[in-house]
Image (cartoon, rainbow, N blue to C red):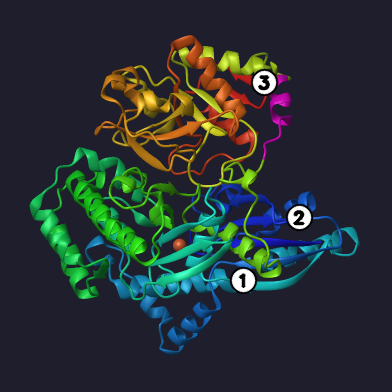
Amino acid sequence: MRFYLGLATTFHDPALALVGPDGTLLFAEATERFLQYKRAPNCEPDAPARIGPLLREYVPPGSEIVVASTWGPQFSGFLKGQAQAGTFDLPVLAAHPTDLNASFVPELAERVFIADLHIAQERAGYGTLLALTQDVRTGGAPPRARITGQRRYPHHLCHAAYGLWGSPFSEATALVVDGMGETGASAIYRLAEGRIEEVKRHRGRGSLGFLYGLITDLAGFDQVKGEEWKIMGLAPYGRPDPELTAILARLYRIEGTRVRFADAETIRDVAAALLARRPADAPERGWADLARCGQDLFGTLMDALVAGAHVLAPHENLVIAGGCGLNSSYNGRVLQRSPFARLHVPSAPADDGNAVGAAWLAYQEDHPGWSGPPAGARPLSPYLGARVSTAPMERLAEHERRARRLGHEGVTREAARILAEGGLVGWVQGRAEFGPRSLGNRSILADPRPVGAKDALNAKVKYREGFRPFAPSILAEAGPDWFEDFADSPYMERTLVWREAVRDKVPAVVHEDGTGRLQTVTAARNPAYAALIGAFRDITGVPVLLNTSFNVMGKPILHTAEDAILMFYTSGLDALVVEDWIVVK
Ligand SMILES: [Fe+2]
């Protein structure tokens, strides 16, 4: 039996995915979860301590494993050329300036980026090999599996494969937009008859992802920590400043549906001009006006790229993939601003999702008749990660009488009651979400009705900036009554506008501009979570919960029941539910 191990090998957000002999996606997880190290920079996705137990769980003895990774062979050639040209000049890397005034030097940034990618890509599969070897050493048995192939796929093709084959569409156009692929930072693909065809790969160093990262840094945040989303959160507090807009306009030219980005010197000039105008408190509070102008600029450039995709690959179905697909504010508006009629953005559009794309590409290479998962498995469930053990809850109950096993109905009723009384509930169920958003399986939940709920949650648990909005989970059937131009949003992939009349019913999840980054919940997609929201609605009349990821600021989403128990006792959570267990303070 042959299994396909997909490895996302960019220096940030590594991940792994396992596809079985029939093409089923068995498992997908970002490396940060197991390591509990946010974004896991420069970490191998198949660390032996992770991949060993996974292979024992999913791969029967005597199997084959094909390792598929997310940068193409073209990239190796590119790297060799760069190396010969002296790009990996270590003194230059060591001298990489750290102060903001000088830090965005695109040539240097690119060298660091390429050198880091090189390391991650070159070692893809070594962890797996080591884990298989350890099996032999420790058990004296033959290896569980043999690695019978190592394949590489173009970076943007991996984004597109995960986005398209994970979508509900049998035909669609995919627009990939991120920091950088092998040759450029965006690409267009087409899905037809189960096969994915490259329509166009943009070439050159210009990158909307990097540009948004630059704005993130200049606005007082840190793109290395993945703080781009703070721009989206802060933007509604800023005003469209014509002077800032004029400076930012020097960064690009739109010619028809083509976007041309400025050269490195102009980017440096623009950064300097913006820094000269930056308010002194930007590093503490963020620079709201720049966030607003930067988010508006992002929309303008995405509009051009989306329009270009429709010209080259006209269709009604659009898939957006790549890290820029995390811009839920833009995703919520794209259908009003383009000729496309339907949108799918996967739960992990950034580089972690590529692990799935690579594994599926390898699978199709061996099974040319395969045309993606069957209709019943699409759109792809986001619940693809690890389960937690309830054994820690059992141990807890030995000396904590408030830890009780009430069964699923019991904990649902109890959690709904606590939420309706204003309590904060940590909620851990089933398999972990794949992607950055908590979708009701690793979530902290709260009542969205009190005006002060957001501040209370920040003060008691999340410890994050006050401007960042909290997201609502809503029963899908209630969506049209609560949102204008309602559309299904199972992965919190889009931000929509709350109906005017309902905003004061759920103030804690209405952002400054009247929007909410919603998750639409159905019993088919997540029965436990739908039951909880339903129970809350029965008490309060409101089919909405405030849903935020189960982590503290700067840490990844939890991975084990022990992580959850630790957070329960070191934060202001009022109750913790793990499967059918509950503990209250
Ligand atoms: Fe990417």
Which of disc 2 and disc 1 is earlier in sequence? 2
The amino acid at mark 1 is Arg
Please state which of the two labelled residues, at mark 3 or mark 1, is closer to the viewer. Answer: 3
Q: Give residue 441's mark.
A: none
Q: Quadrant of residue 442?
A: top right
- Circle 2 crowding by C-alpha within 10 Å: few under 14, some 14–19, many from 20: many
Q: Which residue is mark 2?
A: 55
Q: Is residue 513 above or below residue 372?
A: above
Q: Position of residue 555 (x, y in %)?
A: 48, 43
Query: 360 left or right of 458?
Result: right
Q: Position of residue 301 (x, y in %)?
A: 26, 59
For numbered disc 2, what is the local secondary structure? helix
Q: Which residue is mark 1?
A: 123
The amino acid at mark 3 is His
- Circle 3 crowding by C-alpha within 10 Å: few under 14, some 14–19, many from 20: some
Q: Position of residue 11 (x, y in %)?
A: 49, 64
The CA span between labels 2 and 3 is 30 Å
Magenta part of the chain? 387-397
Whether pointer 2 and pointer 3 mark residues with C-beta atoms closer than 8 Å, the reply is no
Whether pointer 3 and pointer 1 mark residues with C-beta atoms closer than 8 Å, the reply is no
Q: Which residue is mark 3?
A: 408
For numbered disc 1, what is the local secondary structure? loop
Residue at 15% x, 58% y: name it. 274
